Image (tube, rainbow, N blue to C red):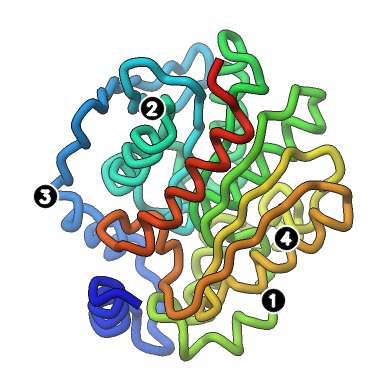
Amino acid sequence: MSIQAFLTRWYLRNQFKPPAGKRVSVEEAREGMARMSRWPVPLPKGIHLKSLPADPLSGLCPAEWLSVDAPERTVLYFHGGGYFSCGLDTHRPVAAAISRRAQARVLSLDYRLAPEHPCPAAVQDALAWYQDVLNDTPAQQIVLAGDSAGGGLVMACLQAALQQGLPMPAGAVLFSPWVDLAATGESVQTNARSDVMFNPENLADAAQFYLDGRSPSDPVASPLYGPMRGLPPLLIFASHSEILLSDATRLHDKALAAGVSSQLVLKSNMPHVWPIMVMLPEANASLRQVAAFLRERVPAV
């Protein structure tokens, strides 16, 4: 473990992880993320940003493109944040890093958030943008990616696209995906102490905001329970220490059982969604794996 990872784990455990029993406040969480975004990380050299406002006529939420000069592949990125916080600012560094490392253009989505817009609003936004990108980009040149809730949103979008008969993208990359809002995974309890970011009750609060009375085992919200057969190859990352470990391992196993190609990368002593923490050497190593997967799935023309 690098010194950067050691210090990050210390900070998250002592400054970020809520005390046991403390309920999640949407307002406090959003204010905290806003404070963290006040000092934006400069874009890497050679990365260009183009903001896209919402288009109510076509049902498209706000988004932004981050791209190298001559992109060879397209990535749709769905940010995490429990479906109720975070956005373009918080996840711009990882989207830019993927763009640079994989010679890609990355579309980062500012999908609607709960509790103001509960499930299935986020899925509708993700699917609308996927359909829009398909208008000018072949599916075999597209990869979906996301972290935490965004990883679950990737899976929900893929399953919705499959049910609508849309062509599947070339692959999907998932960082610590949250795919079971019913929280039935063993690690939710067994890793409650080792997880440096969340307690089990934090998952329950976020799920309540997003579900708004919907069953937590509804596949639209919890794609672990949805169809797997016919989905594209998956690359899944998770930490041995996090409470969402079982979400990743069960998703991997269900995908393999359905005949879907799936690669599971597990790391020890890493925080939840460490690959998006671009200041960590371990994140850079993981993003190199992501870039290799993207190049394999979408070879340069």
Amino acid marked by disc 4? Leu
Q: Earlier in the sequence, mark 3 or mark 1?
A: 3
Q: Please name the amino acid that badge 1 sits on.
A: Gly
**Closer to the observer: label 3 or label 2?**
3
Mark 2, Cα crowd under 10 Å, few <14 / some 14-19 / many 20+, is: some
The amino acid at mark 3 is Trp
Q: Is residue 156 left or right of residue 115?
A: right
Label 1 SS: loop
- Look at the numbered discs 4 and 3 and tell me whether their residues touch, using CB distance below 8 Å: no
Residue 253 marker: none
> Which sits earlier in the primary sequence, circle 1 or circle 4?
1
Quarter of the figure with the C terminus: top right
Q: Give the camera-side residue of 299 and 80.
A: 299
Residue at the spot 47% in from the left edge and 90% down from the top edge: 193
Q: Residue at x 23, y 62 (%)?
A: 32
Left of 24 or right of it: where is 226?
Answer: right
The tag on residue 185 is 1
Q: Are marks 3 and 2 in contact (CB under 8 Å)?
A: no
Can residue 188 be spotted in the picture? yes
Question: For numbered disc 3, what is the local secondary structure?
Answer: loop
Q: Nearer the viewer, residue 12 or 27?
A: 12
- Between disc 4 and disc 3, whose residue precedes? 3
Mark 1–mark 4 distance (CA, rounded to whole Å): 11 Å
| Contact? badges 2 and 4 (CB < 8 Å) | no
On residue 39, which mark appears? 3
Toward which corner of the image does residue 141 lie, by quadrant? top right
Disc tally is 4
x and y, in percent, of residue 132 in the image: 56, 16
Helix, strand or loop status at disc 2: loop
What residue is rendered at 57% in x and 69% in y?
266
Residue topped by disc 2: 62
| Mark-to-mark CA distance, 4 and 3 | 36 Å
